[in-house]
Structure formats: structure tokens, C-alpha cells
């Protein structure tokens, strides 16, 4: 759930910046083909960039003495107490609601496709390569969808207005605008929570109309604009089709009658490149703060990450080494120790075992406690201690009690042999 929220947040941020630039610098300009490609590409960039995690080398300033025995701290995600069970249930409910809305939107899209298919099957179809001409009494206004042009019974095809509308729809077919529409419908269904994708979808539909109007009007701009005004009644068709009577009419006529090229038009388009590069670098690249030797050792252990609070951990390692005289305590191993059943089982154990202290609940004391311990060769937990500042009011004592009572873990192994491994478990107490 947290990973999904993080991804969606990055997608919304990326699309907000890129669409904001479009709205300020590119909207209502005559380079419509450029705007079409821009809107499609920024949608793809917004979806894909947050998925990338490209590591960048990071120079460490830690003393060499620490690096000699600090290879990697094995840790878990922060566990929020209390109550973890309610938090898990809340996350499940939110996830189910989000997925249910996606399902409903995709079903609505599928229903529209089925209706179009049914309309084609029950209509008179005339093959006029490269398109197919569809006539049916149920059609209220001309529209196109992929290779089909749907025509109503009230618009004369041979009239000047009918010929202009036909040219308009042919442009939609030749430019494959239906592919763009279907793509944006799927994107807005899956990422329905992102308002900027809905704005992009609406704007892309208008850009399609600008392109079709420009090519269909030719040199008869005034007559074409008059045709739009005369036949601009509300026609309720499918949202994924290309309708000739597409609102808003005012912007379509404005684009037809705007002949001057805006100043610095090329500069506006070129400036997109550094903006896109900035967004890509900000979201795709992540700093790898581990030393180069550690990065090489952890290449096959991507599920283990470095402890975020390195200052806390550095103090815990010498203490663990001193307390374990007979056994060597490893901080880097081939196979780290794991709680039996995995992290989910550990979360469930903590949820059922930890009781928020009354004093902390009364004083609304909260904070994160880092509990350091060693998982011995036998899987037994030993050398349990708090390695950061205790928030007080009994939180530290409760964390120590529960960790000391944990059942044996599956021990870590190094070169096929069981070894003792230093472990750090952050438990975040939060009063709701």
C-alpha cells in the first residue's frame, strides 16, 4: 500500500509539472501535431519515470575503521504500533476501494466498445477504402472510430457541410486519433485519482479536433467555421469516439481563425527538453549511499536495504561485537536471518504482542525506537538493547520486552554455515 501511494504521488507530481508547462506555454498554439505528441509522451513519462530506480554512486565520509566491519545493516520496514492490525485493515479497505473503482471504469470502457461493436453489426456498412461507412437510425451525429465512419440520417453527405464533415472524420482516421483516445481512457481508468490525466485526456481530444479542422477547412476557413456554428448541437455519443460536434466550439473556431505564429514558438517547444530531463533525473535517479565494496556485496540481495539512521547503527555495532566474545557477529552475510513466516508474520506478532503503555497513551508520547539484537547461530535472539534515544513513558521497555520474547528466527548463513548476525528493528509508536 505504501509503495502504491508513493508511486501515485510521484506520478501526480510528474504529470502536474509537465501539464502545467503545457498549459502555460503550449496550449492554444497552432503547432497542434507537436501538442498531440507532447500530451501522449508526458503521459507515458509520468507513468514510467517513477518506476525507475537508477542508482548513483555516493561518496561516503565515514571513517575507515567503521567501514571495516560495517558492511550492511539488515533491517525491516518500520512497524507502526498501535494498532498494526487496524492499520493493515485500513490499508486493505483503501486498496480494495481503489481497485474497485478501476474495475468499474474499465467495465464502462468495455461496455462502450461492446455498444460500438453491436452498432456496427446492426448497421448498413459500405466499404469505401480506406474506411468503412456505417449508417444507422440510432446514430444522432457523425463520428469516427478507428476505420469506421458513422453517419446519421439527417446530415446530407453530398451537401457542402456533409463533405466538410466527411473530410474532418477522414483526418481522424488517417491520423489514428482513436488509438490516442483508447490509450487515454485506459490510463484515466487505472490512474483515476490523478486529475491531471483527466485534463490531458480532454486536451488531447481537443487537439485532435484542431488537427482535423485545420486539414478539413483548407482555404475555406470562414465557411468551415460557419458550418461548425450552424450544426453545433449537443450530440451524445461515445466518449472514446471522435465527434465532429466536439465542444468547446469557441476554441475550435479560435484555432481556425488564428493565423499568426506566436513569438518564440520554437523556444517554447525546445524548453520542454530540459524540463523533462529535470523531472527524469529527480524521480528516476536515487543516491546509493553505500560504499562501493558494500554495493558489490549486496548486488544479489536487493531485498535488504541499508539502515537509514547510520549514526544510530554505528554505535550499536561495536557494542554488539564486545558483548559477543565467543562468536563472531556478522553484519554482511550471504543469507540474512529471517523471522519465521517473513515480515508479514513479524508484523502480526508485534501487533498481538505490543501493548501501548498507559503513560505513553495518556501523554500522547510517540516516536521510533531502534532495537538492536543479534540472531545467534541457533536462531535465538540475544544482546537486545535500544540503540537510539528512548522517547520515554515506557515505550522502550515495551519494545525490549516484546523483542526478548520473540521466538527463534531462521539464522543467517555465510558460505553455507550458520553464523550470528547483527540485526536492527525499528518500531514506530504512534498515538492515533
Image (cartoon, rainbow, N blue to C red):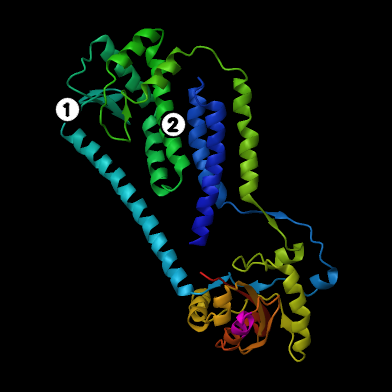
Q: Nearer the viewer, residue 362 or 349?
A: 362
Along the horizontal axis of the image, is 186 left or right of 113?
A: right
Which residue lies at the image location 70% right of the left edge and 68% below the top edge?
A: 309
In the depicted view, which residue is nearer to us: 226 or 75? 226
Q: Could you say where residue 376 lies in the image, as x and y percent from the top left?
A: 65, 87
Q: Secondary structure at mark 2?
A: helix
Residue at the front extreme, as displayed: 362
* Disc 1 packing (10 Å; few <14; some 14–19; many ≥20): some
Q: Which residue is mark 1?
A: 136
Query: Left or right: where does residue 134 sit relative to residue 426?
Result: left
Q: Is residue 301 visible?
A: yes
**Which quadrant would residue 126 be assigned to in this image?**
top left
Mark nearer the N terminus (2 vs 1): 1
Q: Nearer the viewer, mark 2 or mark 1?
A: 2
Disc 2 to disc 1: CB gap under 8 Å? no
Indicate the position of residue 322 as horizontal and vertical percent values.
79, 86
The dominant secondary structure in magenta is helix
Q: Is residue 103 above or below residue 325?
A: above
Q: Quick one: SS at disc 1?
A: loop
Identity of the residue drawn at 33% across and 47% down: 105
In-image side of 146 versus 372 (left or right): left
- What is the residue that sits farthest to the bottom in this orientation? 326
Q: Confirm whether residue 357 shows in the render.
A: no
Q: Which residues are magenta?
A: 393-400
**How many tags in the picture?**
2
- Whether 253 is among the magenta residues is no
Q: Residues within 10 Å of mark 2 (few under 14, many from 20)?
A: some
Q: Residue 411: where, in percent of width, then height?
A: 61, 84
> Would you identify the image quadrant in which residue 404 lies?
bottom right
Residue found at the far right of this picture: 64
The question of residue 399 being in magenta is answered with: yes
Q: Label 2, on which residue? A: 203
Amino acid at each position: 500500500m505504501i509503495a502504491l501511494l508513493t508511486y501515485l504521488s510521484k506520478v501526480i507530481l510528474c504529470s502536474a509539472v509537465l501539464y502545467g508547462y503545457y498549459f502555460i506555454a503550449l496550449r492554444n498554439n497552432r503547432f497542434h501535431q507537436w501538442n498531440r505528441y507532447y500530451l501522449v509522451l508526458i503521459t507515458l513519462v509520468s507513468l514510467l519515470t517513477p518506476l525507475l530506480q537508477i542508482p548513483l554512486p555516493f561518496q561516503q565520509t565515514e571513517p575507515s575503521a567503521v567501514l571495516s566491519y560495517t558492511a550492511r545493516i539488515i533491517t525491516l520496514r518500520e512497524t507502526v504500533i498501535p494498532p498494526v492490525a487496524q492499520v493493515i485493515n485500513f490499508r486493505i479497505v483503501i486498496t480494495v476501494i481503489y481497485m474497485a473503482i478501476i474495475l468499474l471504469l474499465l467495465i464502462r470502457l468495455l461496455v462502450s466498445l461492446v455498444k460500438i461493436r453491436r452498432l456496427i453489426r446492426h448497421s448498413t456498412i459500405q466499404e469505401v477504402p480506406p474506411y468503412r461507412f456505417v449508417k444507422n437510425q440510432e446514430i444522432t451525429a457523425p463520428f469516427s472510430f478507428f476505420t469506421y465512419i458513422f453517419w446519421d440520417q439527417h446530415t446530407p453527405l453530398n451537401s457542402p457541410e456533409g463533405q466538410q464533415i466527411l473530410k474532418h472524420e477522414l483526418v481522424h482516421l488517417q491520423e489514428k486519433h482513436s488509438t490516442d483516445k483508447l490509450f487515454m481512457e485506459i490510463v484515466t481508468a487505472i490512474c483515476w485519482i490523478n486529475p491531471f490525466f483527466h485534463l490531458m485526456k480532454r486536451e488531447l481530444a481537443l487537439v485532435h479536433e484542431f488537427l482535423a479542422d485545420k486539414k478539413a477547412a483548407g482555404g475555406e476557413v470562414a465557411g468551415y467555421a460557419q458550418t461548425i456554428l450552424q450544426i453545433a448541437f449537443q450530440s451524445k455519443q461515445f466518449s472514446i469516439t471522435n465527434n465532429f460536434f466536439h465542444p468547446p466550439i469557441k476554441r475550435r473556431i479560435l484555432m481556425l481563425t488564428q493565423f499568426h505564429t506566436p513569438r518564440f514558438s520554437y523556444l517554447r517547444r525546445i524548453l520542454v527538453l530540459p524540463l523533462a530531463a529535470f523531472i527524469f533525473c529527480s524521480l528516476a535517479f536515487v543516491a546509493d549511499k553505500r560504499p562501493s565494496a558494500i554495493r558489490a556485496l549486496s548486488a544479489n540481495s536487493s531485498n535488504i536495504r541499508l539502515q537509514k539512521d547510520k549514526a544510530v547503527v554505528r554505535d550499536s555495532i561495536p557494542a554488539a561485537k564486545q558483548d559477543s566474545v565467543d562468536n563472531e557477529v556478522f553484519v554482511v552475510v550471504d543469507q540474512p536471518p529471517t523471522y519465521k513466516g517473513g515480515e508479514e508474520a513479524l508484523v502480526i506478532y508485534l501487533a498481538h504482542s505490543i501493548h501501548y503503555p498507559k503513560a505513553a497513551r495518556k501523554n500522547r508520547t510517540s516516536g521510533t525506537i531502534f532495537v538492536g539484537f543479534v540472531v545467534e547461530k541457533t536462531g535465538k535472539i540475544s544482546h537486545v538493547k535500544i540503540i537510539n534515544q528512548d522517547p520515554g513513558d515506557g515505550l522502550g521497555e515495551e519494545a525490549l520486552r516484546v523483542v526478548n520474547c520473540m521466538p527463534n528466527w531462521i539464522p543467517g548463513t555465510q558460505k553455507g554455515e550458520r553464523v550470528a548476525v547483527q540485526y536492527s528493528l525499528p518500531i514506530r509508536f504512534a498515538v492515533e
